[in-house]
Image (cartoon, rainbow, N blue to C red):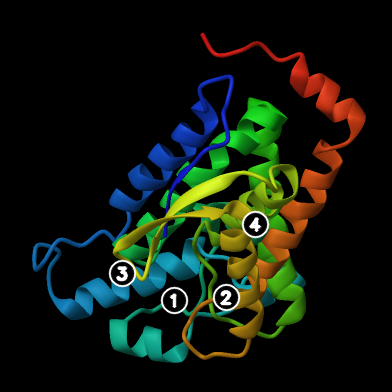
Amino acid sequence: MPLYDNQPTRRAPLVTYALIAFNFLIFLMTPMATFGNSYGSQREQICDQAVFIREYGAVPQELTDNEPVPLPGVVVVTCGLEETEVAGKNPLLSAFTSMFLHSGWLHLLGNMIYLFVFGQATEDRLGRLRFLLFYLGCGLVAAYGFAVTYPDSTVPLIGASGAVAGVLGSHLVMYPRSRTIALVSGIIPFRLPAWVLLGQFFVLQWFSLGEADGVAYVAHIYGFVAGALLGLLARSPRAARRAAALPGRR
């Protein structure tokens, strides 16, 4: 788990902070943000989560066909629903909304820690508006890449992992010599070259393909590769001159 990256920045990473704050705010407004037994019955909680994720998550078959698909029959029966599909759902819009949804606190915290550690330098290099577009673009590539790979899947995708993976890919190619303080084995702080940590992330995604643990590793790979390619463009001489002209932090 990364804790700190030593790459200096010249401006406050306002977009990175805003994305983190927005993800937390959205999470607190969703049925996934439960606190003990305060939510209600377990059945009510599960049903609300299932319907909410289906409405705002990115369903691969919907992305490829560009039309909503019916809710799973088990959800309709278990939750006593009369409707069998999410009315008025826009698949393209769901690819955006899915980036700001998380299944639980650990899912959210893991993504936001990586975004906090590595997003600052990428935002500094690209500039605030370009970084925001870059982040959203990587998330879209991740969602649609997964949909193209599994076009018949009806399991919703949620989470910022694809977009954050893009940030990791860009950091790897733009700052290959930076060093990161990370927790090794969860408890031991250790200083590592960023390429070791980020390269390990990509390799783990690749070798985890096919595991039935509910993690969309393919989406992470698409996002990481997209971020790396865009990061290479940002390393061009023209982009470097533009970045050098940006004002320093005050």
Is residue 93 something one can see in this rendering?
no
Q: CA separation, marks 3 and 2? A: 22 Å
On the image, the x and y values in percent for residue 141 come to: 73, 59
On the image, the x and y values in percent for residue 22 come to: 42, 40
Residue situated in front as seen by the camera: 57 or 44: 57
- What residue is drawn where x is 48% and y is 39%? 19
Residue at mark 3: 48
Q: Is residue 17 left or right of residue 168?
A: left
> Which amino acid does the dot numbered 4 rest on?
Trp
Q: Is tag 2's residue or tag 4's residue first in the polypeptide sequence?
A: 4
Residue at mark 2: 216
Residue situated in front as seen by the camera: 216 or 227: 227
> Which amino acid does the dot numbered 2 rest on?
Ala
Residue situated in front as seen by the camera: 35 or 107: 107
State the residue lying farthest toward the right. 237
Q: Is tag 3's residue or tag 2's residue first in the polypeptide sequence?
A: 3
Find residue 83 and name its label. Answer: 1
- What residue is drawn where x is 64% and y is 69%? 202
What crowding class fits label 3: few (fewer than 14 Cα within 10 Å), some (14-19), or many (20 or more)?
A: some
Residue at mark 4: 195
What crowding class fits label 4: few (fewer than 14 Cα within 10 Å), some (14-19), or many (20 or more)?
A: many
- What residue is drawn where x is 34% and y is 43%? 25
> Which label sits in the foreground, 2 or 1?
2
- What residue is drawn where x is 23% and y is 72%? 45
